[in-house]
Structures are given as C-alpha cells and as structure tokens.
Amino acid sequence: MAQFVTDDGVKLFYEEYGPKNGKPVVLIHGLACTHEYFKEQIPVLAKEHRVIAYDLRGNGRSEKTCRHLTIPQCAKDLNGIIRFLGLEKTSLIAWSYGVNVVFSYAEQFGCDMIDRIVLADNTPKMLCDADWKYGVFPDYQSMVAGFSFMASDWDTYVAGAVPSFFGEGAEPDREEFDWVMSRFSDNDPGIILTMFVNNSTFDARGGLPRINVPVLLTHGTLPSYCTKEIMEGIAGMMVNSRVEEFYGGHLHMIQDSAHFNNVLVDFLR
C-alpha cells in the first residue's frame, strides 16, 4: 500500500496505474467517498496515462484525522502529491468536493504544473447570494438545515443522500446502488460533517482567474446537484473551457461511463 505523508503529518493512501512514462493524471474524488468512485475511468485511462488515484484526508484508506479538514489544506495535499511523485504537466480530474480542491489548488499554486482540468459537478461557492446565482443552496437557512440533518441522524442522512446521487427519476442497478451505499456509510460522521461545513461555506472563486489551461466541466441530465445553468455559468468565468452533459445525476461518470470515458480520453489527448 503506497502512502504519502502530508506537510502536517497526515498519511494519505494512493495507488498508481498505467505506464510510468505515460502522461500523468491525478484523480480527486468527492466527500465521504474514495478513489474507487473513478472505477470506470481508471482502467480506460491507464491504457495510456500514468494514473494516480488517492484518498482525501479523513476519507477511504487515508488517515482518519481531525486535523486541518479544509479545502485549502486538501489543495496543499494535492500539491504535495504532485511534487512527491515528480509529476510534470499533469491533468487533474476532479469530482464533487474534489472540484473545489482544484479551485483552491489553482488559487494557491497556479497552473504551471498542470496540463488540463476536468471538473465534474460542483460549484466554487455553494451558497447563493445577491451576487452569486450559481450555488446549490438557495439561502443560508437551507444550508444550515443540511448541517443539522447530517449531525443529528447520520444513517437517515445517508439513506436520503445516496439515492439523490443517482438523480431524480433514476433507476440504478441494485448492485451499483448497494456498492455506493456501503462505501458512503463507511465513514466517520464527525469528519465528514466538518469537511461538509467547510465545503459549504468556503468560497473557492479565487481560483477561477488563475486557471489558464483547457477545462472540461461536466454534469448530469437528471435533477441531482449542479444544473446545466450552474456549470455553464462557471465555465464562462474561465478561458478555454467547455461543458458536457451526461445521462445521470451526481454520479454521471459511473451511470454514463462509456460516453463519459470517450469524451474524457478525447479531451486529454
């Protein structure tokens, strides 16, 4: 089992796939998830790319720590992995929480070491206000209600969250549904709540003007998380960016994996 130790002493689990001399790709997963959520992408990318898939601090097989559970620190972790492995001109593929990790990375470190970026289904500022209409929480009250629900009844929260990941009206395969449910349930609620609060209240828009490489933004066609309007609005704030939509909800990279992978491989060329 490969491990990387961060600048504040946290052990992060990672795995490598594909040829060592391939163009590097780093996968950054979502909150309360693991690198395994890219299970449909890893074997396809590994045919030509050097793929690095790691688990965020507090998630998956990385250390279950309560230290520095913030997006800026996770961005420092990402920078540490890139430098530790000696990656040059790497592409970043981020989903959900991982998207804001990438925005924070760009704000702190720029994109000199980055080739291309894929951002799947998240917004740099989750709370809408008078100057920002591209959030997922319409107001402060709805955001706080989410915190309260997660803190008071983790099991009930998970039971509601997992179906919503597939999108309204979806009929997921039972085996796939159970796979997501088992992995989402296998988390420390306190750690996830802390990271969720930070993600929901953090403003990562400072990274947008520092992204000067090609960007692909993706979202699902089913009501789930980010809408087409949100993703197109964010894309308009970055140079050389485009939006693609895929069948499914928040998990569209799994639900519509063949289409997603074709677009992904073509974009990374």
Image (cartoon, grey):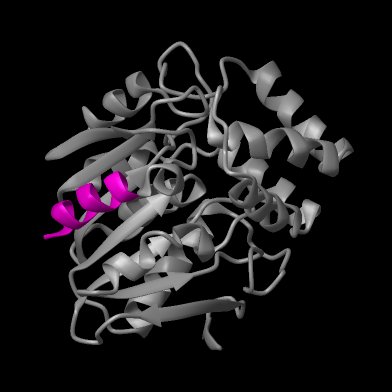
Q: Position of residue 98 (x, y in %)?
A: 46, 52
Q: How many marks?
A: 0
Q: Residue at x 22, y 51 (%)?
A: 262
* Residue 6 seen from this side: no
Q: Position of residue 22 (x, y in %)?
A: 19, 79
Dominant SS of magenta comes to helix
Q: Residue at x 75, y 53 (%)?
A: 185
Residue 269 quadrant? bottom left
Q: Is residue 214 magenta?
A: no
Q: Is residue 50 above or below residue 228?
A: below
Q: Is residue 83 left or right of residue 151?
A: left
Residue furthest right in the image: 152
Q: Is residue 130 left or right of residue 127?
A: left
Q: Tell me the quadrant of the picture where the N terminus can be found.
A: bottom right
Q: Is residue 107 above or below residue 132?
A: below
Q: Position of residue 199 (x, y in %)?
A: 57, 42
What's the magenta region? 258-269
The residue nearer to you, when weighing 71 against 173, is 173
Residue 19 quadrant? bottom left
* Residue 251 seen from this side: yes
Residue 67 quadrant? bottom right
The residue nearer to you, when weighing 265 against 237, is 265
Q: Residue at x 34, y 19 (%)?
A: 229
Q: Is residue 212 left or right of residue 251?
A: left
